[in-house]
Amino acid sequence: MDNSNNKHWKNVTYAGVYDRVGEFALKEELDRQVFEQVLRYIPRKGILVDIACGPAHISKAISELGYRVYGIDISKDMFGKIDSRMHYDFFRGNLVNLDQGLIYQIESKDLLADVGIVVNGWYAMTAQERKKDKNKMEKIRWKSLLNMSKLLKKNGILIITDPLSSSRKLSLLNVISFIKREINAEIQTRLGGKITILKKIKASFVVLLRVLNKKSAKILQYNRQILKDSHLFESAEEMCSFIKRTRIFQVIETNDKLYLGHNILLVARKTVE
């Protein structure tokens, strides 16, 4: 990413546009990776669809670069959290059972997208399966993936981030590892420059307050419950294999890395008409 885009990202993200989870430096690091991937694949004057968009902070960054963006989320409350200054089309929809009328509405507005993003939203759709049957949850994965493809143009790009099953583990060692990674991310993404003792102390203090904040604790607790109730892939290879079997998308690249949890960032190209 060039310097102008890097500066833009710094200026527009994490200015109170997301719930407490958005304050975590590791979350910003993950979203920045998605932002960079969007800019790699979106054509000039292209359209971005933010699937399970939440308050749409990545979309905000992309829209301010001149691209047209819109979002879909199951929660109508999320629309109220989107920056009111942002020109943004918002559609309420369930990607597991997508209303055909919504597809017609999007097509009539000429909003089929060149690039789609779903940031830690695909796995959460499987939480709708109450019996937690693995086969049914995999069917939800397949059905929602097919519905995502309907939002994209021919050969459109879909960028997915999804936690792997190891993200469920909440041992003391994993908690300590998370705090260390958050401190390092705080220094790298927000303090910048050389790592000094003073910066480590400052970052440690900020992270400690962040982790102990009651609202942050509730958000993390809620996320842990969603992880527990959802279908998660064991590895990046398993996720890629699943997508290949659907014949809906072709995987182009993957990035397996620790963020808030153990996440995979995957880029795929639409192969169905």
Image: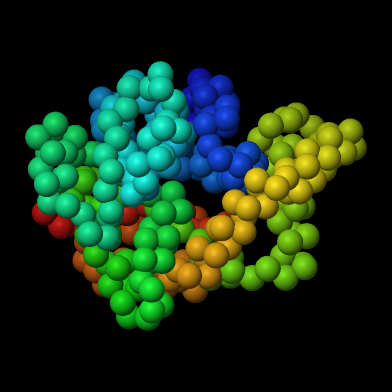
Q: Is residue 96 above or below residue 21?
A: below
Residue placed at 44% from the left, 49% from the top? 119
Q: Is residue 31 above or below residue 59?
A: below
Residue placed at 28% from the left, 31% from the top? 89
Image location of residue 107, percent across then percent down: 12, 39
In the picture provided, is 246 more to the left or to the right than 219? Answer: left
Please name whichever residue, 254 or 135, is drawn nearer the observer in this view of the structure: 135
Colour scheme of this structure image?
Answer: rainbow
Q: Is residue 157 visible?
A: no
Residue placed at 74% from the left, 61% from the top? 175
Q: Is residue 120 visible?
A: yes
Image location of residue 271, percent across then percent down: 19, 56
In the picture provided, is 69 more to the left or to the right than 33? Answer: left
Residue placed at 75% from the left, 53% from the top? 179
Q: Quadrant of residue 239?
A: bottom left
Please name whichever residue, 110 or 95, is drawn nearer the observer in this view of the structure: 95
In the picture provided, is 224 more to the left or to the right than 123? Answer: right
Q: Is residue 55 above or below residue 133?
A: above
In the picture provided, is 97 more to the left or to the right than 192? Answer: left
In which quadrant will I find the C terminus? bottom left
Image location of residue 232, percent across then percent down: 46, 69
Q: Quadrant of residue 237?
A: bottom left
Q: Quadrant of residue 262?
A: bottom right
Image location of residue 261, percent across then percent down: 60, 59
